[in-house]
Image (cartoon, rainbow, N blue to C red):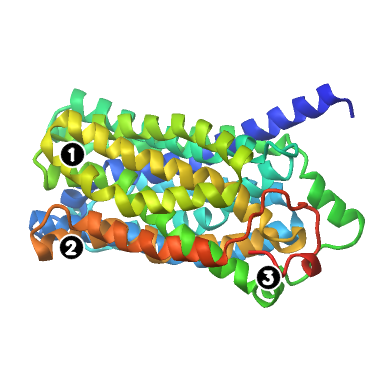
Amino acid sequence: MTPHDQAAVRRKVTLASAIGNFVEWFDSAAYAVMSATIAGLFFPDYDKSAALLATWAIFAGGFIARPLGAAFFGRYGDRLGRNRMLALTILTMSGATFLIGILPTYASWGMLAPILLFLLRCAQGFSTGGEYTGASAFIVEYAPEGRRARFAAAVPVTVGLASVAGSGVGFLITSTVTTEALQSWGWRIPFLLAAPLGLIGLYLRSKVEDTPVFRSLEQHDSVAQEPLREAVRRCGRQIATLFGYSITNAVGYYLMSSYMIAYMSEELGYSKSQAQITNVVSMLAYSVACLFAASASDRFGRRPMLIIACAGFVICPLPAFWLMGSSLAGAMVGTSLLAMLVAVIGTSNVPALVEMFPAKVRASGSAIGYTAAYVLFGGTAPFVATGLVSISGSAIAPALYMVAVAAVSVVVVLRSFKETRGLALDRGVETVTEHA
């Protein structure tokens, strides 16, 4: 294959992974954008604070299925291929999201409505358990040496753009329809968009061949028969290390992307439109910062960038939350500061979670460590933050939570993470046990 052909294939791979990942995270963002409206429609008998807590509890509940999804899709990707796994994740996510869009509310079906909402959120979580790490492995295994982070940046960038699109759609709907229309049918629009977007992503992914690394495993009859078990047995330290610093990635992302809209409107007194505009600004800052942070990661390595990001989350949350309460401009600066820190940790995490695991157990090992962090800390972050504010009466309580989590991650990176930038992606299990 000529260099021109290789470049064309990599562009196709990046586009297929990026669009599919965009669909996954647009669907997740839709729930966050409409959280306040959903609270009133599915929990009308609760007071405002309790209804919002119940809504975030269902949001967190969707993460319960992530470990099952990580185990299922990780094993699927290591045994049958990265591409087949990604096709199945996008079908599951877009289908579940579309069904949320046509789900009757409490007024029609009573308690059955929030129960079904919870189950559909579980289906979304099941899908997401394999999507992010699967898309990461797919892109990185195609990327040229020395440019893995820059190619892999397509994964976090599309996460940011999906949130921008979700917030943009939310802002357009809430600013152009009446309250009655929003509660009747307007809130459903972001969810209903899942069907056409999912079909586009599925089509693009079906047109791309599986990665050279996985094809090599097939050719040499080296595909793991029990990749999940082997990953746990041989790569326990890598899984624990990935979990230890990904908790900051998880809390930072979900507070920044999902919680801030409700936080600004419910706790700081901004209008919903102002909160959504601020979210769009911060997510655009995140998306742009990803490009620069990825280049720095390829130049300086994963470990220095992870240290900078985690230390930044120890230092910056308190000033950022103070800025959020000062003015709308301050809120945009504060949330953008946190967003750029998420970009720094995310753009090094994507190639690192691929590089630290050997080829035959890569999808399984990375999915376990990364997903566990998002289940225990990411999905619960909005719920914990809302609860901390309610209990303490302090609007900066979420910042203190973020600082505490980041302090743990700093210790993990300093003590356990060894540089992965130069590791061969086609190496076997026996050569990786001393790396984390």
Of the two numbered discs 2 and 1 in the rendering, the one whose residue sits closer to the viewer: 1
Residue type, mark 2 in image: Leu
Q: Quadrant of residue 111?
A: bottom left
In the rendered view, does 57 fall on the left or right side of 12? left
- Please, which residue is most extreme toward the right here? 220
Residue type, mark 3 in image: Ala
The residue pinned by badge 1 equals 323
Residue 345 coordinates in the image, percent (x, y): 47, 47
Label 2 – label 1 distance at C-alpha: 19 Å
Q: Secondary structure at mark 3?
A: helix
Residue depicted at x 63% and y 39%: 298
The residue pinned by badge 3 equals 231
- Residue 372 in sight from this viewpoint: no
In the rendered view, does 72 fall on the left or right side of 105? right
Q: Secondary structure at mark 1?
A: helix
Residue 14 coordinates in the image, percent (x, y): 65, 33
Q: Nearer the viewer, residue 86 or 419?
A: 419
- Residue 78 in sight from this viewpoint: yes
Picture disc at residue 77: none
The residue pinned by badge 2 equals 388
In the rendered view, does 164 fall on the left or right side of 21? left
Residue 434 coordinates in the image, percent (x, y): 71, 69
Q: Secondary structure at mark 2?
A: helix
